[in-house]
Image: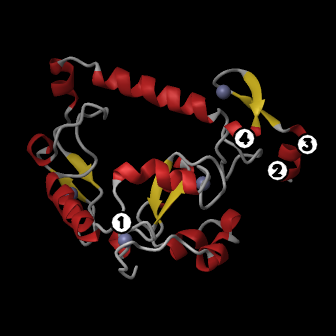
Amino acid sequence: MATATIEATATAWCSGHQRYEPVGEFNPHPTRKTGLQSYCYAWGVAYQKRHMAKLSSRSRAELDAAIPKSKWCPGYGDIPGHIVEDARSGFSRSKYRADNCLGRCKECTRAQKAVREAAQCCFTKDRRHELMSTYGYVCFYCEGKATTLDHLQPVERGGKTCVANIVPACQSCNSSKKDRDIAVWLQHRPDLDSVWIEVQQYVLPECERGATN
Ligand SMILES: [Zn+2]
Ligand SMILES: [Zn+2]
Ligand SMILES: [Zn+2]
Ligand SMILES: [Zn+2]
């Protein structure tokens, strides 16, 4: 069992730093034998930073050349995935992405913005640290190290940006869940099968506006 190995050793090999580090330094990984990512959390953050710096240091000409002719947009809400024939005009620029385009087209980005604005309740970004601290920076789903905040019920599924609907999550859980319904996502994650029961029993902080979520 993966858990037995982890408890017995209490350290794991970090492929980034090329050394053994306490298992607490690693994010969980659902399919790897060890149950942990191959590199520690700090290495992952540093790698991401270097990657971003490299992308953003490109010259104007390089950025311009990176824009593809046409580009796939994954869609948003009722808008299904679609090809945007003129990526240059259809997507906003993003120097942090390899193709210098945002992931969603302008139309879908507008739709997303409208949904997010409508979902705004009592939680704002300046309360990030406060909320993360309440949970001890532990992922609500897998109990790994939380580095992001997640809407328990996504705004696309009627969830509000409310203290009663925002929980800390590790990058791995957050990316795996995306905008899926919390119950649907957990059905696809047998490693987290006890979490749904906890989610239903868990007493989340109350919305300060008294709105129902
Ligand atoms: Zn490391
Ligand atoms: Zn689109
Ligand atoms: Zn997690
Ligand atoms: Zn609220």
Task: Give the distance between the C-alpha atoms of the residues marked 1 and 4, in whole angstroms.
Answer: 29 Å
The image position of residue 4, as x and y in percent, is 88, 50
* In this view, the mark in front (3 or 2): 3
Q: In the displayed structure, does residue 59 sit left or right of residue 5?
A: left
Identify the residue position indicated by label 2 in the image: 2
- Circle nearer the N terminus (1, 4): 4
- Residue carrying label 4: 24
Can you identify the residue that label 3 sits on?
Answer: 8
The CA distance from mark 3 to mark 2 is 10 Å
Secondary structure at numbered mark 3: helix
Q: Earlier in the sequence, mark 2 or mark 4?
A: 2
**Callout 1: 10 Å neighbours few (<14), some, many (20+)?**
many
**Residue on which disc 1 sits:** 161
> Label 4 sits on what residue type?
Gly
Crowd rating for badge 3 (residues with CA inside 10 Å; few <14, some 14–19, many 20+): few
Q: Is residue 124 above or below residue 121?
A: above
Amino acid carrying mark 2 in the image? Ala
The foreground one among 79 and 111 is 111
